[in-house]
Amino acid sequence: MSKEMAKTTVQQQQILKQIQTIFTEQLPFHQLLQLQIRRFDINAVEVVVEMRPELIGNPMHQILHGGVTATLLDIAGGMVAFAGVIERHPEADWPTIQKRLANLGTIDMRVDYLRPGRGNQFIASGQVLRTGNKVAVVRTELHNEDGQQIASGTGTYLVG
Protein backbone atom coordinates (compact mmCIF):
# COMPACT_ATOMS: atom_id res chain seq x y z
CA MET A 1 0.00 0.00 0.00
CA SER A 2 1.42 3.39 -0.93
CA LYS A 3 1.82 6.16 1.65
CA GLU A 4 -0.89 8.20 -0.07
CA MET A 5 -3.28 5.27 0.28
CA ALA A 6 -2.40 4.50 3.91
CA LYS A 7 -5.47 4.35 6.14
CA THR A 8 -5.25 5.09 9.81
CA THR A 9 -7.09 3.18 12.48
CA VAL A 10 -9.14 4.94 15.13
CA GLN A 11 -6.42 4.06 17.65
CA GLN A 12 -3.73 5.61 15.42
CA GLN A 13 -5.82 8.76 14.99
CA GLN A 14 -6.20 9.08 18.76
CA ILE A 15 -2.45 8.61 19.27
CA LEU A 16 -1.66 11.22 16.61
CA LYS A 17 -4.00 13.65 18.38
CA GLN A 18 -2.28 13.00 21.73
CA ILE A 19 1.12 13.63 20.18
CA GLN A 20 -0.14 16.83 18.57
CA THR A 21 -1.36 18.00 21.98
CA ILE A 22 2.05 17.28 23.51
CA PHE A 23 3.83 19.25 20.77
CA THR A 24 1.52 22.28 21.06
CA GLU A 25 0.55 22.37 24.75
CA GLN A 26 3.26 20.63 26.76
CA LEU A 27 6.54 21.80 25.23
CA PRO A 28 7.40 25.26 26.57
CA PHE A 29 9.68 26.14 23.64
CA HIS A 30 6.92 25.34 21.15
CA GLN A 31 4.58 27.55 23.17
CA LEU A 32 7.15 30.34 23.05
CA LEU A 33 7.15 30.06 19.25
CA GLN A 34 3.32 30.03 19.33
CA LEU A 35 3.49 26.92 17.18
CA GLN A 36 0.33 25.77 15.41
CA ILE A 37 -0.13 22.40 13.77
CA ARG A 38 -2.22 22.63 10.63
CA ARG A 39 -1.83 18.98 9.62
CA PHE A 40 -0.52 15.89 11.37
CA ASP A 41 -1.27 12.45 10.02
CA ILE A 42 0.50 9.29 8.92
CA ASN A 43 1.54 10.85 5.62
CA ALA A 44 2.71 14.35 6.47
CA VAL A 45 2.86 17.28 8.87
CA GLU A 46 2.44 21.05 8.54
CA VAL A 47 3.65 23.29 11.36
CA VAL A 48 2.86 27.01 11.22
CA VAL A 49 4.35 30.06 12.94
CA GLU A 50 3.24 33.65 12.47
CA MET A 51 6.00 36.25 12.09
CA ARG A 52 6.51 38.38 15.20
CA PRO A 53 9.22 40.88 16.16
CA GLU A 54 10.73 38.32 18.57
CA LEU A 55 11.49 35.99 15.64
CA ILE A 56 13.42 38.49 13.53
CA GLY A 57 17.05 37.65 12.90
CA ASN A 58 17.97 40.66 10.78
CA PRO A 59 16.27 43.88 11.91
CA MET A 60 17.49 45.82 8.86
CA HIS A 61 15.66 43.48 6.52
CA GLN A 62 12.96 42.18 8.90
CA ILE A 63 13.64 38.54 8.07
CA LEU A 64 13.10 35.38 10.07
CA HIS A 65 16.02 34.27 12.24
CA GLY A 66 17.88 31.29 10.77
CA GLY A 67 17.60 29.46 14.07
CA VAL A 68 13.82 29.70 13.90
CA THR A 69 13.97 28.34 10.36
CA ALA A 70 16.05 25.36 11.51
CA THR A 71 13.81 24.84 14.54
CA LEU A 72 10.65 24.69 12.43
CA LEU A 73 12.25 22.18 10.08
CA ASP A 74 13.40 20.12 13.07
CA ILE A 75 9.96 20.12 14.71
CA ALA A 76 8.25 19.10 11.47
CA GLY A 77 10.92 16.46 10.91
CA GLY A 78 10.57 14.95 14.36
CA MET A 79 6.80 14.84 14.16
CA VAL A 80 6.65 13.23 10.74
CA ALA A 81 9.41 10.78 11.70
CA PHE A 82 7.30 9.69 14.62
CA ALA A 83 4.21 9.44 12.40
CA GLY A 84 6.20 6.82 10.51
CA VAL A 85 6.56 4.84 13.74
CA ILE A 86 2.80 4.96 14.29
CA GLU A 87 2.23 3.74 10.75
CA ARG A 88 4.70 0.85 11.20
CA HIS A 89 3.06 -0.23 14.48
CA PRO A 90 -0.72 0.08 13.99
CA GLU A 91 -1.36 -2.29 16.90
CA ALA A 92 0.68 -0.27 19.43
CA ASP A 93 -1.22 1.21 22.36
CA TRP A 94 -0.57 4.61 23.95
CA PRO A 95 1.79 3.36 26.74
CA THR A 96 3.95 1.62 24.12
CA ILE A 97 3.99 4.71 21.92
CA GLN A 98 4.83 6.93 24.93
CA LYS A 99 7.95 4.85 25.63
CA ARG A 100 9.11 5.28 22.04
CA LEU A 101 8.20 8.98 22.04
CA ALA A 102 10.41 9.50 25.10
CA ASN A 103 13.37 8.45 22.92
CA LEU A 104 12.54 10.74 19.99
CA GLY A 105 15.55 12.86 19.15
CA THR A 106 17.44 14.44 16.29
CA ILE A 107 20.55 12.53 15.29
CA ASP A 108 21.51 14.70 12.34
CA MET A 109 19.93 17.52 10.39
CA ARG A 110 21.02 19.41 7.33
CA VAL A 111 19.43 22.76 6.49
CA ASP A 112 19.75 24.48 3.13
CA TYR A 113 18.79 28.16 3.42
CA LEU A 114 17.43 29.02 -0.03
CA ARG A 115 16.26 32.62 0.42
CA PRO A 116 15.72 35.15 3.20
CA GLY A 117 12.80 34.42 5.51
CA ARG A 118 10.40 37.12 4.42
CA GLY A 119 6.71 36.76 5.09
CA ASN A 120 3.93 36.92 7.64
CA GLN A 121 3.49 33.20 8.10
CA PHE A 122 5.91 30.29 7.82
CA ILE A 123 4.82 26.73 7.14
CA ALA A 124 7.15 23.78 7.75
CA SER A 125 6.17 20.50 6.17
CA GLY A 126 7.72 17.08 6.18
CA GLN A 127 7.54 13.67 4.65
CA VAL A 128 9.13 10.40 5.67
CA LEU A 129 11.77 9.02 3.33
CA ARG A 130 12.33 5.88 5.41
CA THR A 131 11.39 4.59 8.85
CA GLY A 132 13.18 1.69 10.52
CA ASN A 133 12.90 0.20 14.00
CA LYS A 134 15.29 2.73 15.54
CA VAL A 135 15.92 5.49 12.97
CA ALA A 136 13.83 7.52 10.52
CA VAL A 137 14.98 9.77 7.69
CA VAL A 138 12.79 12.67 6.59
CA ARG A 139 12.70 15.53 4.10
CA THR A 140 11.41 18.92 5.28
CA GLU A 141 10.63 22.28 3.66
CA LEU A 142 9.79 25.75 4.93
CA HIS A 143 7.60 28.07 2.84
CA ASN A 144 6.04 31.44 3.49
CA GLU A 145 2.33 32.17 3.03
CA ASP A 146 2.93 32.95 -0.68
CA GLY A 147 4.41 29.51 -1.28
CA GLN A 148 7.99 30.76 -1.63
CA GLN A 149 10.39 28.14 -0.37
CA ILE A 150 12.67 29.57 2.32
CA ALA A 151 14.64 26.45 3.25
CA SER A 152 14.78 22.70 2.93
CA GLY A 153 16.20 20.06 5.18
CA THR A 154 16.98 16.41 5.61
CA GLY A 155 16.97 14.90 9.05
CA THR A 156 17.75 11.64 10.76
CA TYR A 157 15.80 10.93 13.94
CA LEU A 158 16.00 8.36 16.70
CA VAL A 159 12.51 6.87 16.93
CA GLY A 160 12.99 3.63 18.88
Image (cartoon, rainbow, N blue to C red):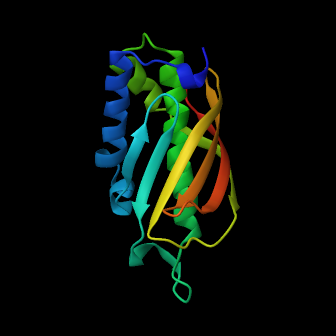
| Residue 150 rendering spot, x and y as whole percentages | 62, 63
The answer to whether residue 116 is above or below residue 22 is below
Which of these two is toward me, 51 or 147?
147
Q: Residue at x 63, y 29 (%)?
A: 135
Query: Is residue 159 shown left or right of residue 23?
Result: right
Q: Quadrant of the N terminus?
A: top right
Q: Quadrant of residue 93?
A: top left
In the image as oriented, which residue stretches furthest toward the top?
Answer: 91
Q: Quadrant of the C terminus?
A: top right
Q: Quadrant of residue 107?
A: top right
| Residue 140 rendering spot, x and y as whole percentages | 61, 47
| Residue 71 rendering spot, x and y as whole percentages | 53, 57
Query: Is residue 59 shown left or right of residue 13?
Result: right
Q: Residue at x 57, y 70 (%)?
A: 117
Q: Residue at x 54, y 27 (%)?
A: 84
| Residue 70 rendering spot, x and y as whole percentages | 58, 58
Q: Residue at x 49, y 55 (%)?
A: 123
The answer to whether residue 157 is above or below residue 87 is below
In the image as oriented, which residue stretches furthest toward the front?
Answer: 146
Which of these two is toward me, 28 or 153?
153
The answer to whether residue 86 is above or below residue 46 is above
Count of numbered badges drawn on the protein? 0
The answer to whether residue 57 is above or below residue 85 is below
